[in-house]
Image: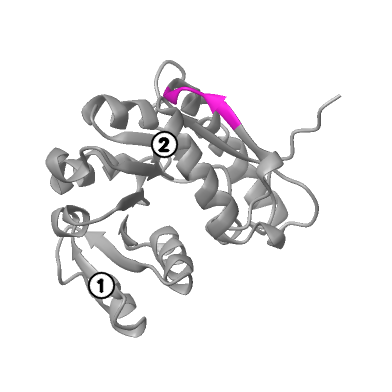
Amino acid sequence: MRIAVLGTGTVGQTIGEKLLSLGHHVTLGSRTADHEKGKAWADAHGDHAALATFQDATRDADLVFNCTAGVGSLEALQAAGADNLRGKVLLDISNPLDFSQGFPPSLSIANTDSLGEAIQRAFPDTLVVKTLNTMACPVMVDPSRVPGDHNVFVSGNDAGAKTQVTQILTEWFGWKKNLIIDLGDITTARGTEQWLPLWVRLYGTLGTGDFNLHVVRA
């Protein structure tokens, strides 16, 4: 499968490396085709890895991951182009973290809206599924890093897209199907995005990103 991973940071590279290990063709998307860090990553990972602009990365992609910084996600996706995203499943892993006032960050979108919703409004013909945004990127692709049972969430308007994403989570990334919680439509992304301020505080206290949420049911 040809997969566009938008974003050349740690999250994008981690997702990209996992996908490459599964035999997929992965193109990291960046603002420019000569992004130094992205080019070094692509050069180091063989013929199935590439770097391209957001537009070129998504043009022939079968699947898209949004791993850009949340405050720049809409701009990046606009650069990719609505035509290149039309009809495609977009896994939105980003969070609207605003570091403009320093650390810890605040949320640039919250309460009555979410970044997931904003992306879906901006690209109504794209099948947006919010997922994996509630944990550190190593845990996203290897849930066994955290012992025992713990959960991952999906939010989206299209049932078929969520089914496909659930298969990706289980078959590619190793998540147990019974621990994947479908929260409902894309408005439920408000809840998972608003977990991030507490996640950041826990990370500071624990000194590691190897932790995750586990919903314990009565």
Q: Is residue 130 above or below residue 60?
A: above
Q: Which mark is residue 161?
A: 2
Can residue 69 be found in the magenta stretch?
no
Left or right, 88 with reference to 108: left
Q: What amino acid is at disc 2?
A: Ala
User: Measuring 16% from the left and 46% from the top, which residue is drawn there?
Assistant: 84
Residue at the spot 14% in from the left edge and 53% down from the top edge: 55
Q: Is residue 119 left or right of residue 189?
A: left
Question: Residue 89, percent across and down?
Answer: 34, 42
Horizontally, residue 38 falls left or right of residue 198, namely left
| On-image quarter of the C terminus | top right
Q: Residue at x 46, y 43 (%)?
A: 164
Q: Is residue 104 visible?
A: no
Front-lying residue, 24 or 130: 24
Q: Quadrant of residue 81?
A: top left
Q: From where the camera sits, is residue 35 visible?
A: yes
- Judge depth for marks 2 and 1 and give the one in front: 2
Residue farthest to the right, as pictured: 218
Where does the magenta region start and end?
Answer: 182-186
**Image x and y of residue 211, in percent:** 69, 52
Give the residue displayed 80% in from the left and 32% down from the top.
Answer: 216
Q: Position of residue 79 (x, y in %)?
A: 14, 46
**Vertical comparison of 24 with 83: above or below:** below
Q: Is residue 3 above or below residue 196?
A: below
Q: Are marks 2 and 1 in contact (CB under 8 Å)?
A: no
Find residue 45 and report its horizontal and vertical position in percent. Answer: 36, 81
| Residue 146 found in image quarter | bottom right
Secondary structure predominantly adopted by residues drawn in magenta:
strand
